[in-house]
Amino acid sequence: MKKETFFSSTLLVAALLAAALFAFTPPPEAQENPAKKPEKPLAMVIPLGKSREIKIDRTMQGDLRFEEYDESVIEVTYEGKRKVITVRGINTGSTDLTVRSKKGRRLYAITVMEEAGTLPSGVRVEVTGSTVPREVIREAVTASARLRAEVRPGARISVAMGKGDTIPAAFEGERLELKLRLSIAGPGYITVEKELPVTVERVAGEYRRDDLLLLSNDPEKISKEAVLLEAAVPLNRAARLMVHHQNYREGGTRIMRVLLSPAGSSPSRVLLVQSLVGPSTDEMYAGHLAASNFLTRLRAMQGWIVDIPEGKEYAAVEVPIKPGGTVSGLLYIVPLSGAALKVVVDAKGGENIEIGPDTSSRTRGVFQNPEISIQKTHTVGKGYTFISLGGKPYLREKTTGSENTGNYGVTYRITVDLENPYEEENDVEVCFIPGAGPASGIITVNGSLMNIPHAVNLQEISLFKEKLGPLEKKTIELSIFPQAGSNYPVRIVVKSRLI
């Protein structure tokens, strides 16, 4: 009786298990094709007008079918003998491509893009100065390559920097042969990169006093694409260009350029010395460092000479400025031969932003004879001698008559005769005191450059002291220009102990 019960229970359990297994058994087709993870397409980027080859393996040989692709974007061909699929980009865009054979398939996600440009086969530059620093050579090579390359709108050319940099820190020879890696890159383009032969030759560069000041500071804040300055530099005239602009905090990245081109029907040979700083969120720092680097280079004539063909624009400066960033720069420009020079400063890219009227006292344009001479005498023991810089009278733009409030970029040459009429020794102290807000500067004292640190309004900064013996006379020569990003006017104060 117990055995029969046990047997019956066993049969019942077996029947229930069989029913459960039958209920959860997948259909035959599911058993034959178990579920797989979706195949991830292989991404490919193809330059417009160029081809890429796909080697196929043995599992994909035989008759191939090309499916699910946009024939307006790519052209697909198959060479059976070489077992190679060739995909050619015929229009910019994206498409999927499925390659099928009897034994399997391959998936590709293909994007066709334009290349950022075409690099020249080589670059040759002529640099000036007895010692030429690495940064000047790099700037000269970049600008010269930009002139000879084909660069797509919105793309930029650059020279690779880093451990593999072969440019010497200071070049003092007559000729230098380099191999430099240059690239052209930009959003929406395929980056083009190549190592190029670069020849650097050192030539003479003669300094001439500036007789034109070109000022680009209005509007100071860029809110749209615009020509910021357009000016002309006659042949054999020396011009100093000061640029100082901030990208508005909205509207995206913009490109600020300084473009030079022959103003006549012949090429123009041009001498350049330049310093550019930024973009920086500290406009006072940018203006100060640009002035310091510029004067250091100008005194040593550390620049380059470029031949600009007729009908060509030479981008001496091309710098992207992110929202809120400030770029400050100074360029010394002399057309040496050929045609006179057209100078354009513009801003490209970004979105136009509507803002209210600019109520600042900034200006732009061409100012002639940008030099002011001041003669002072300080008698030791008789009090203070005050020298105002950046105040009235202001230089006026030659066409519009607008005032250069603050006389930014104008060179002040100051001669101070010191006299000690007494029979005892005394010290003379020269100080810098901002009078319109925070300011700094670079001053030349008897031929030596001196950095003036940042000072707040009415803060007294001691620059140097000069000792005068009994009945002694001395003369000190000072030179300074109001720099961008600082607030002028300021005062130079000469003082000594009262007697």
Image (cartoon, rainbow, N blue to C red):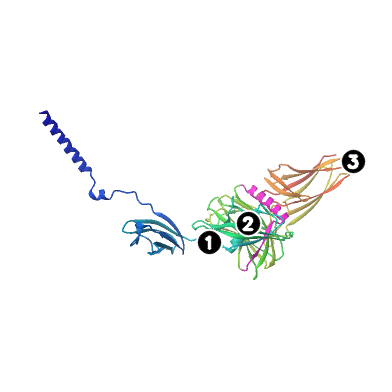
Three-letter code, disc 2: Glu
364 inside magenta stretch: no
Specify the quadrant that holds the C terminus. top right
> Does residue 393 appear in this view?
no
* Foreground residue among 309 and 497: 309
Query: According to the image, label 2 marks what residue?
Result: 139
Q: Nearer the viewer, mark 3 or mark 1?
A: 1
Three-letter code, disc 1: Gly
Query: According to the image, label 3 marks what residue?
Result: 423
Give the SS element for disc 1: strand
Separation (CA) of disc 3 from disc 1: 75 Å
Residue 117 got which mark? 1
Q: Nearer the viewer, mark 3 or mark 2?
A: 2
Separation (CA) of disc 2 from disc 1: 19 Å
Residue visible at 68% across and 51% down in the picture:
293
On screen, residue 193 versus residue 108, left or right, reads right
* Foreground residue among 92 and 88: 88
Dot 2 alpha-carbon crowd within 10 angstroms: few under 14, some 14 to 19, many 20 or more:
some
- Looking at marks 2 and 1 on the same chain, the residue that comes earlier in the sequence is marked by 1
Q: Which residues are magenta?
A: 282-310
On screen, residue 441 versus residue 385, left or right, reads left
